[in-house]
Amino acid sequence: MAARTLPKTDVVIIGGGWTGLAAAYELANNGQRCVVLERGRYRHDATYFAGPGEHDDLKYAHQYEHMMDVSTQTLTFRNTPEQTALPMRRLGSFLPGQGLGGAGIHWNGQNWRPLPQDLQMRSFYVDRYGEQFLSDDDITVQDWGVTYEELEPHLDFFERVAGIGGAAGNVGGEIREGGNPFEGPRSRDYPNPPMKQPIATTLFAQGAAQLGYNPFPIPSANLTAAYENPYGAQLHPCTYCGFCERFGCGYYAKADPIICIYDRLVGHDNFEIRFNAYVMRVDKSSDGKTATGVTYVDEDGQEVFQPADIVCMCAYSLWNVHLMLVSGLGEPYDFRNRTGTVGRNYAYQTLAAATVFFEKDILTNPFMGAGALGMAIDDFNTGNFDQGDLGFVGGGYIGSTQTNGRPIAYQPTPAGTPGFGLEWKRAVRDNYNHSGGVLLHGSSVASPSNFLDLDPTYTDVFGRPLLRMTFDFPENDRRMAAYGLERVVEIVEAMDSVVSYATVNRAGPEQNYSVVPYQTTHNTGGAVIGTDPGTSVVNRYGQMWDYHNVFVFGACLFPQNLGYNPTGPLMGLAYWTLEHMKNAYIPNPRPLMDA
């Protein structure tokens, strides 16, 4: 049966998360008729995320109630191209969302800006160390094609949309005590003050400062004061309940796309959102130069074609890439001869950490937490230290966070403790309230052998090939993680009241990346931004090189991943793209850059 064709709309937006709702708000208020297609269901802060029901550790943190349904859509995984990929049957390493608000509902709330050198990574290292420094055949480092100075107003705007709390370290070039001295210049301070710090993160900051480093509070979307954002949304102060990551916030105290954007947009004459709408493909014109709209399966299981003048791809990063591949948008990446761009430069996040145990008079109260509660240093992030003799590019922040002390997953015990039994129970009892952590949150460089493509064997419930992920930690990142873990230990040993600690390095020697244990929901790349169509899928404005009316949003644009959480940079890029759509493209539809 042929797909039912609907009346044409100005813009069709795939995905109802942060970028999709931001695109709808900006474009609807610019006069464009916007239709948002969200594959999940309707949900709302006040009715769906209210405590105490939402504070169900088993249901939401371990049974993934707010996450995507892998029985409908998943991917296959392998470490190397020589291996056979197998389907990921349950969520683990990363947790994409599904439903109104997307993964913006269950995020922690850490909201970073990129460092200026993050956006010009290749140029930065070549200028500092010479071309030979990037001669390693195992990495493909490139510039983003947009600078920090260009993104700064848009990074600033999103901080106001989300009510971010923090301490500015560089305002107009003036370095301020208590903030991050390495950050790029800001046009103004954060809209809200930083979070109040518990004892564990305070001891970390004191130990780091004692070594000459520069601790500062992690920028947080867990609100620290009553706040009204530029769209008129009202947010409330955080209660430090410890139910941020993997949970929605029913207190309106964690910025999310529903309260910050959707509630200010619903009812607008130019806005419509359709739930349980699963997009199958982006449809192309007969000449193959533009998109004509999208075909989706509606909640009744019927195929529907939504014609549109503009297509905005605002799905989660992995699914944007999958949709390009099954739609035949762009040239798929071929790792054998390194041609093509769609699926190229997939990257992740590189973690190493220490669990710290304090003396018994130090009560850490880990149940009093928040997703972005913590202190960090940026002294070992990309380009902030001399890397000439270290053998790696990139870096990361080192920090101490107190996100939660929930009963199922938070059971810290010293090294050597049995994994079960009476001795384990006693160790949990004796150490739970005297524990903390120090983490390296490291970058991930792109490698020619890490990529996304279509699996030749497995299909989804609609008969489309599954997305296939090929990824392992590049040797560059293994060296970075080993060096970063040494710095973590150095700080732990400088902290007061520490009795013992135990370390873990996810990218340690002979340790392959695994999709089983949770690490981060920071999947990046595969549809990267740039100024060269030979190495990027979209131009510097987020517009596809091959289809000028298709605009792409999200972390799939990152040419390599930063040593930060991706939300701040991807939303800065989103507002940058929307500005150029409104002011340059919509008045005169065309390619905004020559290929």
Image: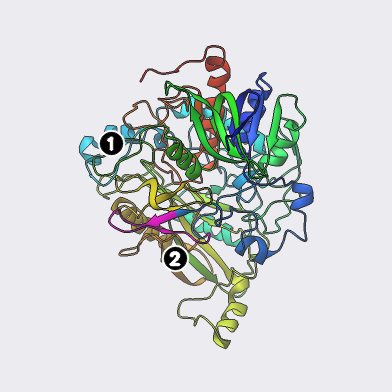
Can residue 421 be seen here? The reply is yes
Q: Which residue is mark 2?
A: 493
Residue lying at 28% horizontally and 32% vertically, measured from the top left: 127
Measured from the top left, where is residue 335 in percent x and y?
28, 44
Q: Main secondary structure of the magenta part?
A: loop
Residue span colored magenta: 76-91
Q: Residue lying furthest top in this view?
A: 588
Identify which amino acid the numbered label 1 is placed on. Thr
Q: Quadrant of residue 273 in the image?
A: top right
Q: Nearer the viewer, residue 378 or 108?
A: 108
Give the colouring mode of the picture: rainbow
Dot placed on the residue nearer the N-terminal end, 2 or 1: 1
Measured from the top left, where is residue 511 in percent x and y?
34, 64
Q: Which residue is mark 1?
A: 339
Measured from the top left, where is residue 539 in percent x and y?
42, 26
For label 1, the SS is loop
Image vertical order of residue 530 relative to residue 414, above or below: above
Residue 85 shown in magenta: yes
- Report the quarter where the C terminus lies: top left
